[in-house]
Image (cartoon, rainbow, N blue to C red):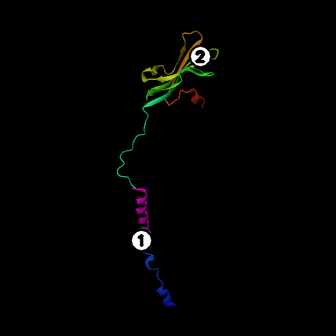
Amino acid sequence: MAGFSGSLSLGPLSLHSIPQSLYSIFLIVMVMMSLVFGKLVPDNPGPPQPPHLPKYLRCYRCLFETKELGCLLGSDICLTPVGSSCFTLHIKNSSGSDILVNDCRSQEQMSDCSYTHSSPVSGFWIYSQCCFLDFCNDPKNKVL
């Protein structure tokens, strides 16, 4: 029996060669992955790019609208440069009627973005409001 245990050998997979074998397998796997999936590290990708910002703000446009009947005149979309706003003008009276005017406002016109005052027509008052996201002045979006 002594001769049998002496002849037993792990051969090329001895305890010292196992880490070397694992390293070789790891290296082969990495080479295969780079061939299949492309480069592991991109060549000098450069500085991170800022997110793409749109050039225009899109707003809902309606020149005469009531909550009961919807848009009666001029339903459309208007575009205004970024930095401008979407605009809603509420014309109300004491009986609760509400007429809306929705449009775009340029930066130069934004001084009247948030104000309330009485109308030249007795019994009515005017409230204006600006917002700065795409279609934020659409009444459908305000309900949601």
Judge from the rendering whether residue 12 lies leftward or rightward of residue 126; answer left or right: left
Q: Please, what is the dominant secondary structure of the magenta stretch?
A: helix
Q: Is 71 left or right of 85, judged from the image as shown? A: right
Position of the C terminus by quadrant: top right
From this view, report whether residue 85 is shown above or below residue 38: above
Near mark 1 (Cα within 10 A), the count class, few <14, some 14-19 or many ≥20, is few
Task: Give the numbered dot on residue 92.
Answer: 2
* Residue 65 falls left or right of residue 104: right
Which residues are drawn in magenta?
25-39
Q: Residue at 54%, 15% (x, y): give it.
A: 117
Residue 15 magenta-drawn? no
Q: Is residue 27 above or below residue 14?
A: above
Mark 2 nearby-residue class (10 Å; few <14, some 14–19, many ≥20): some
Quadrant for residue 27, please give it.
bottom left
Cβ–Cβ under 8 Å for marks 1 and 2? no
Q: Position of residue 97 (x, y in %)?
A: 62, 17
Q: Dot 2 lies on which element?
A: strand
Q: Which residue is mark 1?
A: 20
Secondary element under disc 1, as helix, strand or loop, is helix
User: With respect to residue 30, does 81 lie above or below?
Assistant: above
Real-space Cα distance between discs 1 and 2?
83 Å
- Residue sitting at 40 percent across and 60 percent down? 35
The answer to which image quadrant residue 100 occupies is top right
Q: Is residue 3 above or below residue 73?
A: below
Q: Earlier in the sequence, mark 1 or mark 2?
A: 1
Number of dots carrying numbers: 2
Residue type highlighted by circle 1: Gln
Disc 1 vs disc 2: which is toward the camera? 2
| Residue 92: quarter of image | top right
The amino acid type, in three-letter code, at marker 2 is Lys
In magenta segment, residue 32 = yes
Q: Nearer the viewer, residue 124 or 69?
A: 69
